[in-house]
Amino acid sequence: MRATRLISTGNVQTIDTDAPTRGDADIVVKVEAAGICGTDRHLYKGEFPSVANTILGHEFSGIVTDAGNSDLQIGTRVTCDPNTWCGACNQCRKGRVNLCVNNIATGIARDGGFAEYCAFPAHKAHVLPPDLNPLHGALCEPLACTLHGMDLGLPQAYERVIVIGGGVIGLLAVQLAKKAGAQVMLLTRSTAKQALGQSLGADRVAGSKDEALDQWPHGAELVVECAGVEATVSMSPSITHTGGRVVVLGVLPQGKQVAIEPFDLLFREIQMHYSFLNPFTHERAAQMIANASIEVAPLITRTISLEEVPAVIASDVPAGEVRAIAIP
C-alpha cells in the first residue's frame, strides 16, 4: 500500500509499504480521509516528540475492513481517537488520561492515517453514520481537542469571548463559544478568515490587539489562544478582563518561551490554562459532527492525494487555508 512516513526530522515521504498487521485488540480500516494538522508540521521539523519512521496522520476516519475481536461490523464508518492511554499510571488513575506517561498516539508513536489502511485499538474507534460525508469524519479529532479546551475555559452565556487564530481550532472554538451563549470575537489578521468566522457565528472580528480593545476596551472574560504563536500567547492576558481566564490551545514548538508578566496575572487574578489532547471528548465530537450541530464543511479548504502530503507538510500553510485533507 502507499503511505506517508516521517523517515526522520525533515524527511517525510510517500512510499510503498506493507499493509498493517492487526494486533489482537486492533481493527483495520480503509482510510477515507485524513487531515493535515499543524502538529504534523511540528513533527516534520522535530519540534514535537515522535517516533522515527512512523506513518503520520492522527486526524482520520475510515471504513472497518477487519473487525478483529471487536463488536464492530465490517463496513462501519469510524473515526479514530488517536490517543491510547495506559490506564495504570498515576495520571490515568487520577482521571488525567491526557497526561498519561505511557500514551501511544496513532500517527505519532504508531502508524497512522496517511495510508490506504490503518490498524489501531478497537476501543479507540467511534462510530459515525453511514451517510456522513467521509471528509467530515476527519474533523472529529480537532473538535475533540477544542472541546477539552472549552471545557477548561467554560464560556458562559452573555460573557465576552475572544478567540485568537482563524485556523480549524479557532473556528471550532468560535462555534462552541457561540453555542454556549457567549458574545464572540474572532481575532485574526486574515480578512478571509474573519469573514468565515462571521459566517460561523462570530459577532465581531478584529485584526489586531488594538482593534479588539477598541471594541471591548476592558477585554474579554475568556480568551482562547488558538494560533500557537509566541506573540499571541504573550498578548492574551492583556486582552483579558480583570478576573478572567485564558486557555491556550495553540501548540508552540518544544523549547519555545514567551514573555508573561506575573505581577499583572497576580494583580488582576488572571487564570491561565493550557489544554492538551482530548480526554473523554472524542465521542462527543463524533456525535456533534454526526448530527451537524457543528459546521465543518466550510473548514475544508482542499483535498489532496497521499502523493501530495509530503510537500504540504513541508510547506507553510497557504494564506486563507483552514484544513487540507488527504484522500488515500
Image (cartoon, rainbow, N blue to C red):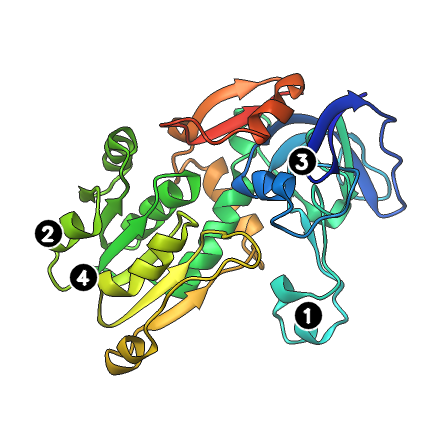
Dot 3, crowdedness within 10 Å: few (<14), some or many (≥20)?
A: some
Residue 97 seen in the figure = yes
Q: CA distance from mark 1 to mark 3?
A: 33 Å
- SS of the residue under disc 2: helix
Of circles 1 and 3, the one toward us is: 3
- Residue at mark 2 to residue at mark 3: CA–CA distance: 43 Å
Q: Nearer the viewer, mark 1 or mark 2?
A: 2
Type of residue at label 2? Answer: Gln
Crowding at dot 4, Cα within 10 Å, few <14 / some 14-19 / many 20+, comes out as many
Q: Which mark is residue 92?
A: 1
The Cα atoms of the two marked residues, 1 and 2, are separated by 43 Å
Amino acid on which the number 3 mark rests in the picture: Gly
The amino acid beneath tag 1 is Cys
Instruction: Find numbered disc 4 in the image and state the secondary structure of the residue it sits on.
Output: loop
88 is higher (above) or lower (below) than 177: below
- Which one is earlier in the sequence, the residue at label 2 or at label 3? 3
Q: Is residue 196 left or right of residue 247?
A: left
On the image, numbered disc 4 is attached to which residue? 219
Instruction: Return the disc, 3 or 4, that comes first in the chain's sequence.
Output: 3
Q: Amino acid at mark 4?
A: Gly
> What's the CA distance linking mark 3 and mark 4?
40 Å
**Relative to 241, residue 31 above or below:** above
Q: Nearer the viewer, residue 19 or 28?
A: 19
To which residue does mark 2 refer?
Answer: 215
Look at 21% across and 46% down and name the residue there.
Answer: 208
The residue pinned by badge 3 equals 10
Task: Check the picture and name the quadrant holding the C terminus.
Answer: top right
